[in-house]
Image: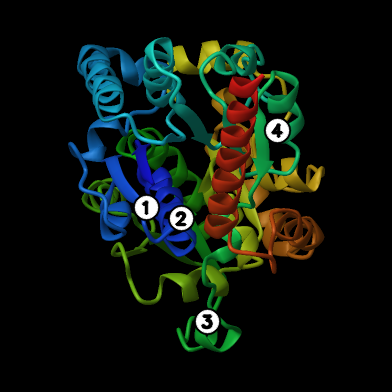
Amino acid sequence: MRVFVIAGEASGDKLGAALMAGLKSLRPDVAFDGVGGPLMQAEGLVSRFPMDELSVMGLAEILPKYRALKARIRQMADAVIETRPDILITIDSPDFCLRVARLVKAVSDIRTVHYVAPTVWAWRPGRAAKMARHIDHVLALFPFEPPYMQAAGMDCDFVGHPVVAEPVATDDEAAALGLDGTVVLVLPGSRKGEVSRLAACFGLAVAQVAAKLPDARFVIPTTSGVCDLVREKVADWPVPVTVLEPGAETRLAHFRRADVALAASGTVSLELAANGTPMVIAYDMAWLSRIIIGFMLRVDTVTLVNLVSETRTVPEFIGKDCQPGPIADAVLHVVDNPGDQQDAMALTMQRLGQGGEPPGLRAAHAVLDRFEQASVDNDQAKRQ
């Protein structure tokens, strides 16, 4: 079996690696081609070009790189058409991946699978119908997503969220850090654009928190690609901050030990929920993206814990509301009321598949089961 797989950012690299491992365990004869990061490469993928070229987020941010991205889209589509794999699996990065799938489907019957359902429940609901023209099967991370995809005419399976399979530290490991006082995790994003936009606001917010909590310790776990930028930005903060290097051995222990987190909107909220760490979410974006997305948004919260648990217990400050004063007040409130979010976080993890089959393996089963059924259906259609 030959599978062409494309991922465009770090989160997709994680998903792709777990899916590849699952496919290898079920089909030892599988061979991979495509684009991915270091985790997917560790599973046997020889990436056709560096995945980092595709790691662009936000409408305004994409525009300067449009020509280069358009060329890569054509290159990937041509590669798929030429090699004719059994399955094309595209992972997240819909602005790139779905364009590749569209070009492939225009001239072939190669089966297409997209991993991570687009957030049609949040904005641009028409994407599902457009996507169904060139996507056969969707792998969904959230249990409420399949009906949206199925209504548009695609197969869709909820396969669990990868956060449920990630390790968490024990209470003993957290205690071994020896940190007294209130520990505040500060997570300004995993992309340079996010860090650049949020660092100043987050710095002013933590300064106000420090004024009320003199014993507070502020810790920033960093990711590859933004560590140097984070160090540069926090150098101007009026409070001391501990910056953890990417891959720091104590990262998980700090997540477990933290009393509260101030985090950019994104999947990190689920990592915090897995560790039982209450949080405040804040996010801003380029002004053009803010205006367009704000106009199109169809939900009253973008925080995943709020959405999955169907509660609104996690305070969030998005767009124009991303201001230091209200953010600091919310952090202080969470410190004083740490139990408010516990039920919502536990429910979130349960609904995302905690305790069940690993999501990568579950996704592999879904891909193979649907592929085999489609093959049977095609054979029956030919005989009729």
Mark 3 closeness class: few <14, some 14–19, many ≥20 residues within 10 Å: some
* Residue denoted by label 2: 23
Q: Which one is earlier in the sequence, the residue at label 1 or at label 3?
A: 1
Asked which secondary structure carries label 3, the reply is helix
Position of residue 82 relative to residue 176, above or below, is above
* Residue denoted by label 3: 174
Asked which secondary structure carries label 1, the reply is loop
Between the C-alphas of marks 2 and 1, the distance is 7 Å
Q: Which one is earlier in the sequence, the residue at label 2 or at label 1?
A: 2
| Colour theme | rainbow
Residue type at the position of mark 1:
Val
Disc number for residue 30: 1
Does the CB distance between marks 2 and 4 fall below 8 Å? Answer: no
The percent position of residue 225, horizontal first and vertical second, equals 25, 48
Mark 1 closeness class: few <14, some 14–19, many ≥20 residues within 10 Å: few
Residue type at the position of mark 4:
Thr
Residue sitting nearer the eye, 175 or 67: 67
Between the C-alphas of marks 3 and 2, the distance is 35 Å
**Whether residue 118 is visible:** no
Mark 4 closeness class: few <14, some 14–19, many ≥20 residues within 10 Å: some
Between the C-alphas of marks 3 and 4, the distance is 31 Å
Position of residue 29 relative to residue 328, above or below, is below
